[in-house]
Image: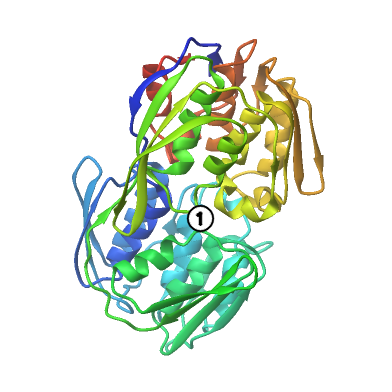
């Protein structure tokens, strides 16, 4: 697919529901006795695979309308033995979090996924889960999928100091801790997305969060609660909102409003960075829904300048660095994005994939260690084809670039965009974007 320099983008839109919240809403519905009602669920392939897995583990999961779903769960500790492997497609979030859900239950399950997911490391989640008593029965080379695990008859609570800033690893441990007696504690040096903690509280669990060090936190969970059904309103995904947000900022004359975007402070790193770069962004109608901060964002075409993005901000915007690199190309001056080691273990090696895309499109850049440095000139030559490596965020990021580049930008594959943002292309066209 190719995107071309467009006129001013204009309009009001709603991006799909947050993927992180959507996965968790289904999983918490599985672990609750009674009916959980979900509205605004992201109906991309990743989340639909999680819904299917919840059914395999005993839940009754039904779609009642667009984005509207109900889950009749089996309760904490009530998971059924699955008859078939649990297939998560392209979703690392679904696989790692569900390892936590399943891992402290006395059942055996095989986790699998597509070719891309089979390349991604899983030991970072399995290592702490083994502390609960989980046994890894079989695994592919390097601790990769397919993996068969067997949970203990009686899980034991753990205290785990996470060596990586990963919300997925933290969440896997907390979700396993639900079926362990006593208190399970996670200590993180850098605060990561706290959707799991917020949703635990929303469903009635006893969770305590205290500061730890300069940027970290200590999360303590009392195990074996009886989770209470609670409605979940899924806010718009800030990681999906990032694409029209950056597009409107870099295309001159644009005026775009994105409604109902999650404004969780641990997810707004891109917003903070764009404002530092000079982006004209207004936050409107701030509110709280299902325990999450939400607001509408109005963004206009802006003149951007380079900034230094600190490493401690990375957990709050880890999925947004590819499109930030695009914004940096259109900024005047150097943008240095520090501490991007986690990008190397995403759907692709995103750091390498972004750098290769910048090279193909004529943008001056360099990688120094785990830092990406983009030397912006206010323009991007364009070109392609950009290799997406089956990564939806690489595909969308470089299609956004093409809307403001001197020449068209072509990406080699858009198939995987459906995993998180099925309507991305028609939505961008409705705003005035030239994609064909």
Q: Which of 144/238 is in front? A: 238
Colouring convention used in this rendered image of the protein: rainbow
Q: Nearer the viewer, residue 62 or 168?
A: 168
Q: Is residue 331 above or below residue 45?
A: above
Q: Residue at x 63, y 29 (%)?
A: 326
Residue 136, visible in the rendered structure? no
- Residue 216 lies left or right of residue 283; in this view the side is right
Residue for point 56% across, 83% down: 159
Q: Is residue 359 left or right of residue 390?
A: right
- How crowded pointer 1 is (Cα within 10 Å; few <14, some 14-19, many 20+) is rated as some
Label 1: element kind: loop
Between 373 and 43, which is closer to the camera in this rendering?
A: 373
List x then y, in percent, for residue 390. 57, 37
Q: Is residue 100 visible?
A: yes
Give residue 236's quadrant in the image.
top left
Residue 331 on image: x %, y %: 67, 26
Could you tell me which residue is drawn at 67 percent across and 69 percent down? Answer: 163
Q: Position of residue 17 (x, y in %)?
A: 35, 44
Relative to 263, does residue 83 appear above or below in the rendering?
Answer: below
* Residue 277 picture quarter: top right
Q: Foreground: 320 or 103?
A: 320
Q: Give coordinates of residue 22: x percent, y percent.
A: 36, 52
Give the tally of numbered discs.
Answer: 1
Q: Is residue 131 above or below residue 321?
A: below
Reading the image, the residue beneath label 1 is: 266
**Left or right relative to 270: residue 85:** left
């Amino acid at each position: 697919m190719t995107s071309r320099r467009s006129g001013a983008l204009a309009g009001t839109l709603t991006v799909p529901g947050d993927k992180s919240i959507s996965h968790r809403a289904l999983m918490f519905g599985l672990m609750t006795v009674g009916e959980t009602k979900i509205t605004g669920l992201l109906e991309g392939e990743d989340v639909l695979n999680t819904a299917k897995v919840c059914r395999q583990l005993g839940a009754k999961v039904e779609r009642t309308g667009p984005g509207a779903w109900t889950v009749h769960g089996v309760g904490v500790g009530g998971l059924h033995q699955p008859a078939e492997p649990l297939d998560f497609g392209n979703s690392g979030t679904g696989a790692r979090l569900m390892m936590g859900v399943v891992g402290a239950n006395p059942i055996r399950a095989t986790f699998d996924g597509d070719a891309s997911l089979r390349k991604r490391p899983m030991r970072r989640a399995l290592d702490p889960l083994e502390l609960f008593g989980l046994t890894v029965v079989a695994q592919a080379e390097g601790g990769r999928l397919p993996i068969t695990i067997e949970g203990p008859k009686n899980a034991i609570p753990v205290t785990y100091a996470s060596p990586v800033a990963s919300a997925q690893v933290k969440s896997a441990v907390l979700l396993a801790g639900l079926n362990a007696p006593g208190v399970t504690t996670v200590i993180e040096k850098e605060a990561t997305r706290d959707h799991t903690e917020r949703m635990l509280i929303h469903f009635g669990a006893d969770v305590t969060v205290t500061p730890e060090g300069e940027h970290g936190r200590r999360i303590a969970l009392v195990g074996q609660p009886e989770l209470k059904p609670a409605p979940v309103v899924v806010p718009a995904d800030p990681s999906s909102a990032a694409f029209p947000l950056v597009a409107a900022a870099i295309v001159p004359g644009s005026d775009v409003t994105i409604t109902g975007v999650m404004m969780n402070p641990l997810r707004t790193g891109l917003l903070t960075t764009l404002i530092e770069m000079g982006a004209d962004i207004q936050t409107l109608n701030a509110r709280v829904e299902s325990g999450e901060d939400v607001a509408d964002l109005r963004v206009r075409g802006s003149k951007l300048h380079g900034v230094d993005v600190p490493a401690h901000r990375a957990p709050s915007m880890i999925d947004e660095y590819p499109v930030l690199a695009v914004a940096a190309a259109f900024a005047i001056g150097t943008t240095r994005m520090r501490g991007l080691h986690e990008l190397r273990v995403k759907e692709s090696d995103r750091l390498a994939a972004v750098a290769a895309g910048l090279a193909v499109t004529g943008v001056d850049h360099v990688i120094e260690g785990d830092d990406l440095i983009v030397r912006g000139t206010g323009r991007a030559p364009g070109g392609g084809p950009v290799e997406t490596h089956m990564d939806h965020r690489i595909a969308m990021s470089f299609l956004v670039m093409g809307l403001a580049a001197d020449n068209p930008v072509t990406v080699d594959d858009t198939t995987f965009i459906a995993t998180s943002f099925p309507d991305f292309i028609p939505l961008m066209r409705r705003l005035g974007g030239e994609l064909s």
